[in-house]
Amino acid sequence: MGHRIIFATGNEGKMREIRLILADLGLPILSMKEAGAEPEIVEDGTTFGENAEIKARAVWNLTGDIVLADDSGLEVDYIGGEPGIYSARYLGEDTPYEVKNRSIIERLKEARGQERGARFVCSIAAMLPDGRVLHTEAVMEGLIAVEPAGNGGFGYDPILYLPQFGKTSAEITMEQKNEISHRGKALRAMKEALEGVLK
């Protein structure tokens, strides 16, 4: 089976988390940049899972290795699951997250209690050298905060309030976050799925 794992991301923070969680697989783990495989990718799927697979397949087409990719975003119940798969593009790719976060809080000003329910979703797709595809998906449930708080994390972290901590996703420690985060959970599930096929 595959002699190396390529993760279709250029995000160094993400690569650190990935290397930490997948280390037990005993395979070298490269970013697509390190693998020299940086295709133009058009994410035109309608779900997180489809977009993750589109990214993984684009890099797999160039390398044929075990290729993983993730797609993630914020779903807010009160506004019909928005921004969802458009999380990065919400109000425009180059719009600062302070503005995006303010906009979501503003749209929820009438929402109370559980109406503020929201979650981070992370889908991971793995392309295997023989063309098989594995999928895992996990969520981190919370509520949209009344005010942004915290400067850890990035993106929508300051507005997802986690009742079990009494803090937003941007206020908890990295250790706490890795334990409960959507990406951490989806990665651990993918590690198990890969262990099953790599035996």
Image: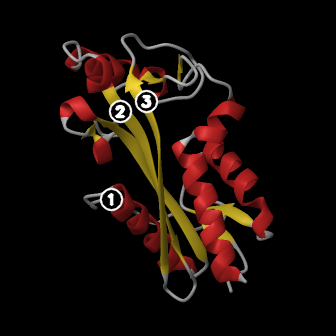
Q: Residue furthest bottom?
A: 130
Which type of secondary structure does the marked residue at label 1 adopt? loop
At a point 68% along the width and 47% down the height, the residue shown is: 17
Which type of secondary structure does the marked residue at label 3 adopt? strand
Q: Are marks 2 and 3 in contact (CB under 8 Å)?
A: yes
Measure how far apart labels 3 and 1 are at the Cα level.
27 Å
- Toward the viewer: 14 or 92? 14
Q: Judge left or right: residue 23 versus residue 195.
A: right
Tell me residue 34's x, y (percent): 67, 61
Check disc 1 and report the residue beneath it.
Answer: 43
Check disc 2 and report the residue beneath it.
Answer: 118
- Residue 3, above or below 76: below
Could you classify mark 2 by the number of other residues whose Cα lies within 10 Å: few (under 14), some (14-19), or many (20 or more)? many
Image quadrant in which the N terminus is located: bottom right
Q: Are marks 2 and 1 in contact (CB under 8 Å)?
A: no
Tell me residue 172's x, y (percent): 62, 23
- Residue 118, above or below 46: above
Residue 32, can we see it?
A: no
Check disc 3 and report the residue beneath it.
Answer: 142
